[in-house]
Image (cartoon, grey):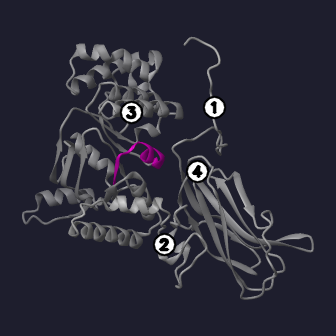
């Protein structure tokens, strides 16, 4: 298969100066003394994109995702390495890139068209499709500096996607538009993808990554981590988000050993990512830190919360008779993670140590949105779990397993150990907003959760 994009050993170094005057000192110093320190935005990055593929690039902020797109499109030059692009490119990078703010929308359409190598006659033929897709009305005749960010991205994306590029590059631009325009854009991207257009995209929307990408490249702090199927790369990305770098390195090392063994045996099997995905589909679960989400636990002092981002500004109170000393979130495959897939089962675990006798403890959890609205939650009393009286030194390991039906987004998890004494509600230990969790979805509905409707539509009358 022919490659549309080849990135080979690309490094991008920025010089960082503590003071502006240091730049001048360095340029004038006769002994070539350096006053800067080097920052590697990219470090020896290599990957390729085959023609017709949809490839995603994921990673945390500062991983170099936007930098490599700018190098591919020629906006930036690499410090070392080279990039080869085979085909006409249409890129939607930073909002406003390539637009003259004083020109009208129409003028920017023609100007950008000429920059991409299209004649005025060719742009005339595409103009109506661009205007129909952007749907910004008479504003197309106004200077773009008067546009809202939503109008701007509508016009920019309409132009980028309707010039029939061989390669389309998109960098987070769709996050500005409303949900209806985003859906329209993804439908259009799917159309041109089926026609053979190569698409390279950067997004934090893991739902889109899972739904659209044939291959995903994972970066971290400018370094190439891995590439492979979307599902596997998202799982590895979860480990980066949860600061599980040791577990990530162990998994990658195991994959390399599997590939080497397969090659040595002459089986022709060299896809370690496929091996990992097959194990996941077969029910094999990762076991980070010796802790499983199914209630099992291996010996060792490892704490679940050490591998998650615990909120340092959480609210915490109680009379001290109980202590929630550890907590964890597990996905359906048993991975300890704060990144959960909508539609899959997940488990919340709490470990509680008692410092005094309690007659009837109740263990709880609550999930809230970022505005503080309580969306769902339950406790052992509601669920009918029989908790016997506990003594000083007793410990409980409590798990709540349920299906994730919340819409894609970011949420906050609270948990507590409470009880009733003499008819009064007593809090032994409560942790408000102790963990954050992110739900990944490739199908959101209206509202905060999905009713999981089963749809049937039959035509009962009409023309054949």
Most foreground residue, 24 or 283: 283
Task: Pinpoint residue 241: horizontal percent, then vertical percent.
Answer: 45, 62
Disc 1 from disc 4: Cα separation:
20 Å
Question: Is 297 above or below relative to 150?
Answer: below
Q: Which residue is mark 4?
A: 343
Most foreground residue, 230 or 355: 230
Q: Is residue 216 magenta?
A: yes
- Crowd band around label 4 with a 10 angstrom C-alpha radius: few (<14), some (14–19), many (20+): many
Q: Is residue 190 magenta?
A: no
- The circle on residue 287 is 2
Q: Which residue is mark 1?
A: 456
Disc 3 from disc 1: Cα separation:
27 Å
Q: Which circle's residue, 1 or 4, is located before the other in the chain?
A: 4
Instruction: Evaluate if marks 2 and 1 touch, with contact meaning CB atoms under 8 Å apart.
Output: no
Q: Residue at 27% across / 30% down in the picture?
A: 165
Q: Which circle's residue, 2 or 1, is located before the other in the chain?
A: 2
Disc 2 from disc 3: Cα separation:
37 Å
Question: Is 344 above or below relative to 425?
Answer: above
Q: Which residue is mark 3?
A: 189
Question: Is 234 above or below relative to 77?
Answer: below
Q: Does residue 323 appear in the picture of this structure? A: yes
Q: Which circle's residue, 4 or 2, is located before the other in the chain?
A: 2
Q: Nearer the viewer, mark 2 or mark 1?
A: 1
Q: Which circle's residue, 3 or 1, is located before the other in the chain?
A: 3
Q: Residue at 23% across / 69% down in the picture?
A: 265
**In this image, 298 relative to 126: left or right?**
right
Most foreground residue, 299 or 432: 299
Q: Secondary structure at mark 3?
A: helix
């Amino acid at each position: 298969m022919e490659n549309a994009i080849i990135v080979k050993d690309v490094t991008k170094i920025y010089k960082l100066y503590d003071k502006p005057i240091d730049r001048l000192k360095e340029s004038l110093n006769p002994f070539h003394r350096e006053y800067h320190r080097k920052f590697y935005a990219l470090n020896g990055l290599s990957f390729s994109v085959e023609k017709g593929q949809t490839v995603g690039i994921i990673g945390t902020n500062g991983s170099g995702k936007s930098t490599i797109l700018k190098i591919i499109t020629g906006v930036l030059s690499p410090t070392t390495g080279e990039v080869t692009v085979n085909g006409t490119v249409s890129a939607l990078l930073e909002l406003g890139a390539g637009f003259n703010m004083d020109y009208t929308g129409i003028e920017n359409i023609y100007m950008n068209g000429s920059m991409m190598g299209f004649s005025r006659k060719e742009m005339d033929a595409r103009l109506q499709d661009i205007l129909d897709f952007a749907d910004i009305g008479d504003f197309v005749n106004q200077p773009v500096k008067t546009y809202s960010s939503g109008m701007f991205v509508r016009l920019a994306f309409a132009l980028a996607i309707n010039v029939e590029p061989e390669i389309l590059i998109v960098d987070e631009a769709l996050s500005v538009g409303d949900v209806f325009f985003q859906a329209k854009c993804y439908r259009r991207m799917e159309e041109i993808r089926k026609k053979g257009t190569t698409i390279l995209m950067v997004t934090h929307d893991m739902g889109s990554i899972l739904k659209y990408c044939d291959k995903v490249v994972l970066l971290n702090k400018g370094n190439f981590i891995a590439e492979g199927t979307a599902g596997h790369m998202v799982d590895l990305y979860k480990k980066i988000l949860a600061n599980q770098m040791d577990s990530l390195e162990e998994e990658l090392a195991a994959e390399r050993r599997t590939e080497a063994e397969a090659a040595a045996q002459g089986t022709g099997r060299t896809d370690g990512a496929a091996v990992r995905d097959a194990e996941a589909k077969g029910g094999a679960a990762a076991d980070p830190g010796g802790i499983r989400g199914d209630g099992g636990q291996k010996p060792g002092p490892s704490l679940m919360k050490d591998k998650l981002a615990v909120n340092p500004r959480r609210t915490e109170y109680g009379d001290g008779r109980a202590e929630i000393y550890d907590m964890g979130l597990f996905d359906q495959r048993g991975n300890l993670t704060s990144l959960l897939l909508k539609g899959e089962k997940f488990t919340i675990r709490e470990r509680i140590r008692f410092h005094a006798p309690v007659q009837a403890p109740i263990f709880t959890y609550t999930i809230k949105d970022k505005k503080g609205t309580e969306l769902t939650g339950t406790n052992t009393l509601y669920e009918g779990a029989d908790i016997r009286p506990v003594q000083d030194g007793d410990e409980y390991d409590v798990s709540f397993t349920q299906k994730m039906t919340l819409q894609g987004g970011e949420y906050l998890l609270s948990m507590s150990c409470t009880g009733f004494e003499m008819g009064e509600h007593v809090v032994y230990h409560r942790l408000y907003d102790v963990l954050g969790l992110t739900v990944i979805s490739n199908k959101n509905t209206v509202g905060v959760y999905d009713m999981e409707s089963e749809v049937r539509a039959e035509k009962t009358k009409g023309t054949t």
